[in-house]
Image (cartoon, rainbow, N blue to C red):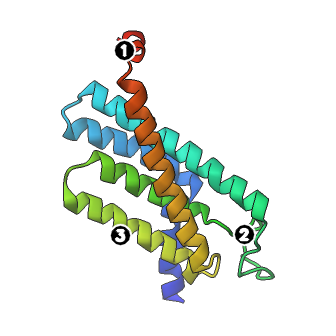
Amino acid sequence: MAFEEFWKLITLFGGFEIWVAIIFAILAIYAIVTKSKKHRIASLAFILISSIIVSTAVAELLKMSLKIPRPCVGSSDCPSDYSFPSGHATRIFTLAAVMALSIRDFRIKFAFLILAMLVSISRVALNYHTYADIIAGALVGVLVTYLVNVLYKRVSSLKTFKTITS
């Protein structure tokens, strides 16, 4: 039973409810570490928030389109929405991907990757998802973050964008 409690604690980090606090904490820490370089903080904020919104929307659209039931259907503590892809894995891998693109320190990148893997595994350990669900969620999170980052770099390099934001 103690192991189940451990996984329940870990799974909280992928829950939508905690994301506002996580985003503000990351931005605050980033501001302190980078000595408040406003452009870099604004870039991180835009990429992080945009990636979370888009990846969550993609995951929800896939859930509603595919309607794959959870492995825990019939259990009293089983979430009522669909299983594929895992929203927790989507969000936590989105965060890990943004941090991998934004932070130079390999140890911090590695810590976010470990956290993402633990949160995702917690969903399988609690019988809320299958491995396919969490792998798909991880792919959605990473791919959306990559696309948002590419689009942001292209748009921010345009002369018109620089004039508007100056």
| Residue at image coords 61%, 66% | 86
Image side of residue 52 versus residue 113, left or right? right
Name the residue that disc number 1 marks: 159
Element under disc 1 = helix
Q: Residues within 10 Å of mark 2 (few under 14, many from 20)?
A: few
| Residue at image coords 51%, 49% | 144
Report x, y in % for residue 105: 19, 54
Residue type highlighted by circle 2: Pro
Q: Is residue 84 above or below residue 129?
A: above
Image side of residue 140 versus residue 67, left or right? left
On residue 18, which mark appears? none
Residue 97: name its quadrant: bottom left
Q: In this view of the protein, which residue sits in the foreground, 28 or 113? A: 113
Residue type highlighted by circle 1: Lys
Q: Nearer the viewer, mark 1 or mark 2?
A: 1
Residue type highlighted by circle 3: Ile
Q: In this view of the protein, which residue sits in the foreground, 32 or 153? A: 153
Tell me which numbered mark, 1 or 2, is placed earlier along the sequence: 2
Cα gap from disc 2 to disc 3, whole angstroms: 25 Å
Q: Is residue 67 above or below residue 123?
A: above
On residue 79, which mark appears? 2
Q: Is residue 135 above or below residue 92?
A: below
Name the residue that disc number 3 marks: 114
| Residue at image coords 76%, 64% | 66
Cα gap from disc 1 to disc 3, whole angstroms: 39 Å
Q: Residues within 10 Å of mark 3 (few under 14, many from 20)?
A: few
Tell me which numbered mark, 1 or 3, is placed earlier along the sequence: 3
Report x, y in % for residue 39: 30, 26
Element under disc 3 = helix
Cα gap from disc 1 to disc 2, whole angstroms: 48 Å
Q: Is residue 60 above or below residue 27?
A: below
| Residue at image coords 54%, 89% | 1
